[in-house]
Every structure is written in C-alpha cells, then in structure tokens.
Image: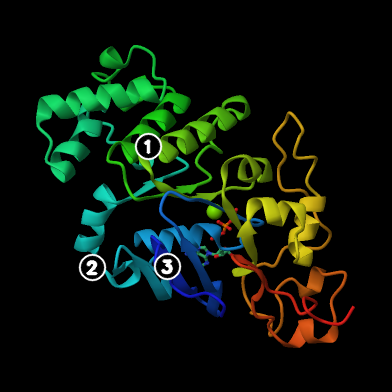
C-alpha cells in the first residue's frame, strides 16, 4: 500500500472493510479501502450504484446495518472511529463529525421548533448561552438563504418545504463548525434545478468554516466543480484516486476512463450524470479473485481475472489499481 498516515491528515482510513452476513453466506461490500482526508479538503467519492459508497460513510458514523461487520482503521483526530463506544461516537457526532442525509427528516425532530433545534447543538456541545445560540441559529438560517429567518426559526419542520428542510439540515450540520462533514448524495431528493445551488452552498459554507467534506455523488460535474480530490470506487474497491484535475484530464484506470468517457461533456449547462458503460455492474455476492472490473474491461489481460491489482502510485497523491499500469505497452 503506498498510503501512509500523513502528519496533516484529519481522517486516515486504512483497509476499511465491510462484510454483510446474508442467509447464503458473507458478502463483502467494501474491500480494504484506504485514503486520507486533509483538513478543509473536499473529497468526492464516485462509483456506480452498489459500489460501496454509502457503506463507507455509514461505517464511519457507526450506522452500519445489524448484519454488517466492519474492520480496518479510521483514525480521526487521534481516535479510531471504528472502535469507539456508541457514547463516545455520539459525543463526537455533535461536535466534530456531522452527516447530511438524503432525507432531512432523518435528522430533524418534528416536535421541536427549527431555531431551537439548531441552537441546541451550540448550547449542549459548545457551551453557548441560550440567547447567543438563538441568534447564531437565525444568522445561519439566513446564511443558507431561508427567507425571513427570524420568523421561520419559530416554526416546525412540517412547515418547511423539502428544499427548505434540506437547507435547515445543512445549517444544523455546519453550525457547530465540525472538522468533518459526511454528505451522502445530499440533494437527490431535491428538484434538479436547485440541486446544484444546494451543493454549492454546502461547499461554500464548508470552505468558510474550514470543514473537510466527503461528498458521495453520482454527479461527475459536481465533483469537477467542487472537489479537490476524488476516489473512483468499483465493486467495493478503490480503482483510482487523485486530484480531480489530474483524474479528469488523464484517468489511468480503464473503469475511470470509461466512466468519464460515457459522461456527457462536463461543460454542459445541465450537470452530467454518470454515463452508462457496457456490461452489468457487479452485484453483491462472490468476490472475484482478480479485479472486480475485469468482466467488463475491454483491455484486460490474463492476470486481471486471477490477481488483484494493487494500487500503483502514478504521481504523489495519484494512484490507480490496474495491472496495465507500468506493464510494457
Ligand atoms: N444490510 C445489508 N445487507 C446486505 N447487503 C447490503 C446491506 N446494505 C448494503 N448492502 C450491499 O452492499 C453493497 C454496497 O452498498 P452501498 O449502499 O454502499 O452502495 P452505494 O455505492 O451507496 O450505491 P447507491 O449509489 O445505489 O447508493 C451493495 O451491494 C448493497 O446491496
Ligand atoms: Mg448509497
């Protein structure tokens, strides 16, 4: 593994593996994924449905399904998130680690006024006085462009539209200025026309607060526009990772190339979605002995079916897991 903990890394993930127990046996959803997140950095994770994106975030938040088992290491501010007790994780969740879900109602309390919900985090976790916290909550609602924020703060979640609730959740996640924000397809439930605006807002507020973000998305246009680095995941494994500029300009892995080639022009006014590439995405179940992408790869060699390619370093911070890299042309 070329990856080592960097002295400046905020999150150091090493060999994160997620297995699910199923009636027919075990199924590996995430296979020895390693990466670093630097403070304030925005990291995009892309990959087709089922590639393991959500399970990476769930395991970091201690929210894996009951039949799931995680192994590996996730060092965050000196502690391994994977071995923290639920109490310790709870404490961390409110202060230095936040998550934005697809459905805002997952994190909003329907019986509590919006302003009070936002202020609570500041009172409980930051020791702020009630009046000061209430003022900060209103200012944040204003920041996420909720019109008439002072009046809206006295309302309940059901009085907000879906889009407005999503903004409230973003406000709540970022108000405590967490060191790391985990966002899993945070706008898919929203109208397409406002998705880009809301993502831009997340990035803007995170940059302002110095919050690092792991953003899971299907949308390569979003990655190109907002992320510093990206990870391309397939079949639970990292196929390629690197600075967005480099990966977009010269993807090294055949899967990453196919994904980018199949995506409509990044300059299109409409944000491009992941394109379709030939073949069927790997469905959960048997782990192949070789590269998970081999069955769909048009340039594979014999070793691809039998041996797992390790991540080859291409440049500092840019790696790809493909047998063809470094092989004679
Ligand atoms: N509780 C579970 N039991 C068994 N398998 C599961 C469970 N939860 C998820 N999986 C499987 O784990 C794999 C990875 O799932 P994950 O939700 O991380 O995919 P994803 O990349 O987030 O996909 P999407 O883009 O559709 O959200 C999938 O094959 C999925 O079916
Ligand atoms: Mg998902």
Q: Residue at x 37, y 37 (%)?
A: 105
Q: Is residue 258 left or right of residue 234?
A: right
Q: CA distance from mark 2 to mark 3?
A: 19 Å
Q: Look at the numbered discs 1 and 3 and tell me whether their residues touch, using CB distance below 8 Å.
A: no
Looking at the rendered image, the disc whose residue lies closer to the viewer, 2 or 3, is: 3
Going from N to C along the chain, the mark reached first, 1 or 2, is: 2
Examine the rendering and report whether any part of residue 64 can be seen: no
Residue at 21% x, 39% y is 121
Q: Does residue 213 appear anywhere in the picture? A: yes
Residue 219 percent across, percent down from the top left: 65, 44
Residue that protrudes farthest toward the right in the picture: 329
Instruction: Identify residue for label 2.
Output: 85
Image quadrant, ligand 1 = bottom right
Residue in the foreground of this view, choosing between 152 and 9:
9
Q: At 32% from the left edge and 36% from the top edge, which residue is drawn?
A: 172
| Relative height, residue 95 to residue 77 (above, below) | above
Residue behind mark 1: 105
Kindly tell me whether mark 1's CB lies below 8 Å from ligand 2.
no
Q: How many marks can you see?
A: 3
Q: Quadrant of residue 53?
A: bottom right
* Whole-percent x, y for residue 90 in the image: 24, 56
Q: Sequence order check: which comes first, mark 1 or mark 3?
A: 3
Percent x, y of residue 254? 79, 66
Circle 3 residues within 10 Å: few <14, some 14–19, many ≥20: many
Residue holding disc 3: 12
């Amino acid at each position: 593994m070329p990856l080592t903990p960097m002295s400046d890394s905020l999150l150091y993930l090493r060999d994160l593996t997620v297995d699910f127990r199923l009636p027919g046996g075990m199924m590996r959803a995430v296979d020895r994924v390693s990466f670093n997140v630097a403070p304030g950095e925005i990291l995009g994770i892309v990959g087709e449905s089922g590639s393991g994106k959500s399970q990476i975030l769930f395991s970091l938040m201690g929210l894996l399904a009951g039949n799931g088992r995680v192994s590996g290491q996730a060092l965050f501010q000196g502690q391994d998130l994977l071995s923290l007790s639920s109490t310790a994780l709870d404490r961390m969740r409110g202060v230095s680690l936040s998550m934005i879900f697809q459905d805002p109602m997952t994190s909003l309390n329907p019986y509590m006024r919006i302003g009070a919900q936002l202020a609570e985090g500041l009172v409980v976790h930051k020791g702020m006085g009630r009046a000061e916290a209430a003022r900060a909550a209103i200012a944040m609602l204003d920041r996420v462009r909720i019109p008439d924020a002072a009046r809206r703060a006295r309302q309940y979640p059901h009085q907000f539209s879906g889009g407005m609730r999503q903004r409230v959740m973003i406000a709540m996640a970022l108000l405590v200025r967490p060191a790391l924000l985990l966002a899993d397809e945070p706008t898919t439930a929203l109208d397409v026309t406002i998705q880009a605006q809301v993502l831009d807002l997340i990035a803007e507020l995170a940059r302002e607060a110095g919050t690092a973000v792991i953003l899971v998305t299907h949308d390569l246009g979003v990655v190109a526009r907002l992320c510093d680095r990206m990870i391309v995941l397939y079949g639970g494994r990292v196929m390629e990772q690197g600075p967005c500029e480099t990966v977009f300009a010269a993807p090294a892995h055949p899967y990453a190339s196919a994904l980018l080639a199949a995506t409509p022009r990044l300059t299109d006014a409409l944000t491009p979605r992941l394109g379709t590439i030939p073949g069927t995405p790997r469905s959960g179940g048997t782990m192949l002995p070789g590269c998970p992408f081999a069955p769909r790869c048009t340039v594979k060699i014999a070793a691809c079916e039998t041996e797992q390619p390790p991540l080859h370093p291409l440049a500092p911070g840019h790696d790809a897991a493909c047998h063809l890299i470094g092989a004679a042309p």
